């Protein structure tokens, strides 16, 4: 873009980040030039789907080792090789069937749901394992099996709840609660004077019927603070949008929302 009237950054209808593209040339008129650039590199043409390019040289698709990707052409030629995969700035040997790329190596994923884990353990889904959709509504496809550690407390006047011992994304919190035989807490459990979920808004969980910062925290919020302390952000089952879910800050009693991909503590209702 050559003008302040253009930006490559924006938001979609759900308020999620979105990249906008501005074309400054008629790409159809440059078609022949583009094709020449992507088929010849440093004067040397690599055989499509049989070789990939790196640093001005062609290598067979079944080559061992990792090779630096220095151009879009090298990236595309690596992707075209059936035995290789592009990760970051490197073209590396591809994973075997049933494996995914995890933190620099090919591994067999532990789980994609709770049913893949041993009895009593849950599947904590991880965005760093394997490919996943860029859509903000897409949950991670793989994860690690973990024991659902946490603390269980009877919250006066509300019920018995378990808070996870570590933070996780929203989908993992669902799995956590399901595995311990509970269900994710909802904003209604905090007995706010104002129906934030129904109104699609955020604010402090007070006894007031407004979204004002003033007022006394609800009796339920105080009971949760007594039971679990005043730290941590708790995932709620309630949706704010297709990409976001509600959560509650224990310290302030603030009802707000995060991207489902963010981290927070699971809060599960286990008994009345």
Image (cartoon, rainbow, N blue to C red):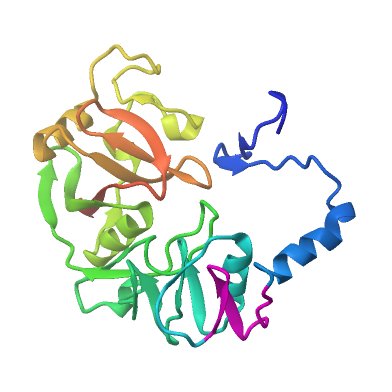
Task: Look at the picture and state if 160 lies above or below 248.
Answer: below
> Residue 67: image x %, image y %?
45, 71
* Residue occupying the point 27% across, 13% down: 215
Examine the rendered structure and indicate whether residue 52 appears above or below residue 160: below
Q: Is residue 91 visible?
A: yes
Left or right of 38, for residue 186: left
- Out of 189 and 255, give the one closest to the viewer: 255
Q: Is residue 109 above or below residue 36?
A: below
The quarter of the image holding the N terminus is top right
Instruction: Count every numbered label the image shows and give the total.
Output: 0
**Does residue 137 appear left or right of residue 184 in this picture?**
right
Q: Position of residue 23 (x, y in %)?
A: 77, 42
Please provide the residue range marked out in magenta: 44-61
Residue 73 sits in quarter: bottom right
**At x 31% / y 45%, what residue is drawn?**
235
Residue 80 spot, x, y in % from top left:
61, 77
Residue nearer the viewer, 7 or 46:
46
Q: Residue at x 50, y 74 (%)?
A: 85
């Amino acid at each position: 873009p050559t003008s302040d009237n253009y930006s490559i950054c924006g938001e979609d209808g759900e308020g999620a980040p979105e990249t906008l593209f501005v074309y400054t040339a008629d790409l159809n008129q440059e078609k022949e030039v583009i094709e020449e650039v992507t088929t010849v590199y440093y004067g040397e043409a690599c055989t499509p789907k049989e070789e990939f390019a790196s640093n001005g040289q062609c290598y067979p698709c079944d080559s061992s080792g990792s090779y630096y990707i220095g151009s879009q052409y090298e990236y595309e030629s690596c992707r075209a090789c059936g035995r290789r995969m592009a990760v970051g700035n490197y073209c590396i040997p591809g994973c075997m069937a049933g494996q995914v790329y995890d933190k620099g190596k090919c591994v067999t994923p532990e789980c994609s749901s709770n049913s893949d884990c041993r009895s009593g353990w849950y599947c904590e889904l991880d965005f760093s394992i394997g490919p996943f959709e860029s859509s903000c509504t897409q949950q991670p496809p793989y994860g690690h099996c973990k024991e659902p550690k946490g603390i269980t407390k009877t919250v006066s006047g509300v019920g018995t709840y378990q808070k996870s011992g570590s933070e996780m994304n929203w989908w993992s919190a669902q799995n956590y609660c399901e595995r311990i035989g509970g269900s994710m807490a909802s904003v209604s459990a905090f007995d706010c004077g104002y129906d934030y979920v129904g109104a699609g808004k955020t604010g402090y969980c007070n006894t007031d019927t407004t979204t004002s910062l003033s007022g006394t925290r609800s009796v339920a919020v105080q009971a949760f603070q007594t039971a679990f302390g005043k730290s941590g952000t708790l995932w709620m089952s309630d949706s704010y949008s297709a990409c976001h879910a509600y959560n509650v800050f224990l310290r302030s009693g603030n009802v707000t929302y995060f991207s489902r991909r963010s981290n927070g503590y699971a809060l599960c209702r286990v008994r009345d």
